[in-house]
Amino acid sequence: MNLPNLLSLFRLFVTAFFILLVAYERYTLALVLFVMQALSDLLDGFFARRMGMKTSLGAHLDPAADKVMLASSYIVLCVQGILPLWLVGTVFLRDLAISVGFLILWKRGLTATPAPSLVSKMTTVFQMLTIVYVLAFDDRNFDLFFFYTTALLTAVSGIQYFFVGWTAFFRKEVV
């Protein structure tokens, strides 16, 4: 097991503690854990690409850890009344659509994973920044900039994935 994969496992492990901290309204500690998770995401990608530590396990573990971390964060923050349901729904609808799309492509025999686009990377960054923002400011009078920007990027990236998948489906090409 290499360092990038250990960092992905760290994100998965810490997610449970993050959920508990938010549930018990320990937002400052939750913020610290979430920032550590976000930094581990950056570091595992850096080590995997720059240091030649890519593995097939990591190709699946890293995005799974990201999804678990972000989905859990959005759910628990929505349940606590911190994030609006419409934003959480937008994030989940995109992820569900991407997952169903990959399943359809996989059933057609297309098994490659597309490289994340700039928009999808920006989406992940804004989804993380939104969580940091709401945990850092506990007055709950949020400027909606992060919510709207995150929702817009999430929708645009979902549409982009749709068109990549649509093209692959009809051309039966590897994406």
Image (spheres, helix red, strand yellow):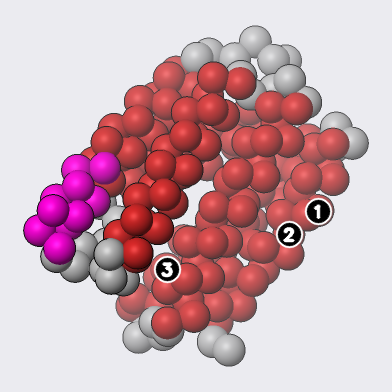
Secondary structure found at label 3 = helix
**Separation of marks 1 and 2 at Cα, in angstroms:** 5 Å
Magenta run includes residue 166 = yes
Q: Which residues are magenta?
A: 162-172
Which residue position holds label 1? 17
- Look at the image and say whether residue 160 sits in the magenta stretch: no
Q: Residue at x 53, y 56 (%)?
A: 66
Q: Do the numbered discs 1 and 2 sit on residues whose CB atoms are within 8 Å? A: yes
Label at residue 45: 3
Q: Quadrant of the N terminus?
A: bottom right
Of the pair 171 and 129, the residue shown nearer to us: 171
Identify the residue at horizontal 49%, vertical 22% (top origin).
Answer: 147
Give the residue at the far top of this rendering: 141
For the view shown, which residue lies furthest in the left direction? 171
Say which mark, if any, is on residue 106: none
Q: Residue furthest bottom?
A: 1
Query: Sequence order check: which comes first, mark 3 or mark 1?
Result: 1
> Nearest the camera: 90 or 31?
90
Residue located beneath label 2 in the image: 14
Query: Would you place residue 120 above or below residue 52 in this image?
Result: above
Residue 68 in the figure: left or right of residue 80:
left
Amino acid type, callout 3: Gly
Gap in angstroms between the C-alphas marked 3 and 1: 23 Å
